[in-house]
Amino acid sequence: MVVQGAIEHNRIEGFIYIFGRKIMKSSNTIIFGKMFARVDVEDDPLLVVEYKVNGKLIGEDYNMPYEIRLPISSKRCIFEVVAKDYFGNEEKKEMEFIKIG
């Protein structure tokens, strides 16, 4: 199972975003306005994709597209995606971000 997208090969980390548009490089990932994290999957069909912030489950997806709106936070957060397939395999990816508004 290969999980790609917003949290792996096409990383969004290290930039400032305004309403989903990449504005400039930054030492932190800072997001202003609405932005979605999308997970693309190659190979195996998935059973579930779990979304967590600071270890707390904030959502699950059972069907494509696998995406969630990133929650507002005034402090640094760890966003984690856990993709699980029907064969018992799972893959985790995480990123740190600050989302304002």
Image: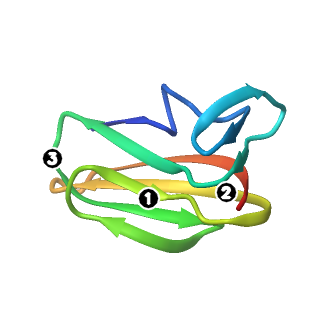
Distance between the alpha carbons at the discs numbered 2 and 1: 15 Å
Going 57% across and 41% down the picture, which residue do you hit?
20
The mark that comes first in sequence, 2 or 1, is 1
Q: Residues within 10 Å of mark 1 (few under 14, many from 20)?
A: some
**11 relative position to 97: left or right:** left
Dot in front, 2 or 1: 1
Seen from the viewer's position, the closer of residues 23 and 30 is 23
The residue tagged with tag 1: helix, strand or loop? Answer: strand
Marking on residue 68: 1
| Residue type of the residue flagged with mark 1 | Ile
Going 49% across and 50% down the picture, which residue do you hit?
36
Q: Position of residue 25 (x, y in %)?
A: 77, 25
| Residue type of the residue flagged with mark 2 | Ile
Q: Position of residue 52 (x, y in %)?
A: 53, 65
**80 relative position to 40: left or right:** right
The residue tagged with tag 3: helix, strand or loop? Answer: loop
Going 18% across and 34% down the picture, which residue do you hit?
43
Distance between the alpha carbons at the discs numbered 2 and 3: 26 Å
Q: Are marks 2 and 1 in contact (CB under 8 Å)?
A: no
Q: Which residue, given by chain and number where applicable, does mark 2 sit on?
A: 78
Q: Position of residue 89 (x, y in %)?
A: 28, 51
| Residue type of the residue flagged with mark 3 | Pro
**67 relative position to 29: left or right:** left
Q: Residues within 10 Å of mark 2 (few under 14, many from 20)?
A: some
The mark that comes first in sequence, 3 or 1, is 3
Q: Residues within 10 Å of mark 3 (few under 14, many from 20)?
A: some
Seen from the viewer's position, the closer of residues 54 and 75 is 75
Q: Position of residue 50 (x, y in %)?
A: 40, 63
Going 80% across and 39% down the picture, which residue do you hit?
28
Q: Which residue, given by chain and number where applicable, does mark 3 sit on?
A: 45
Q: Is residue 27 above or below residue 72?
A: above
The residue tagged with tag 2: helix, strand or loop? Answer: strand
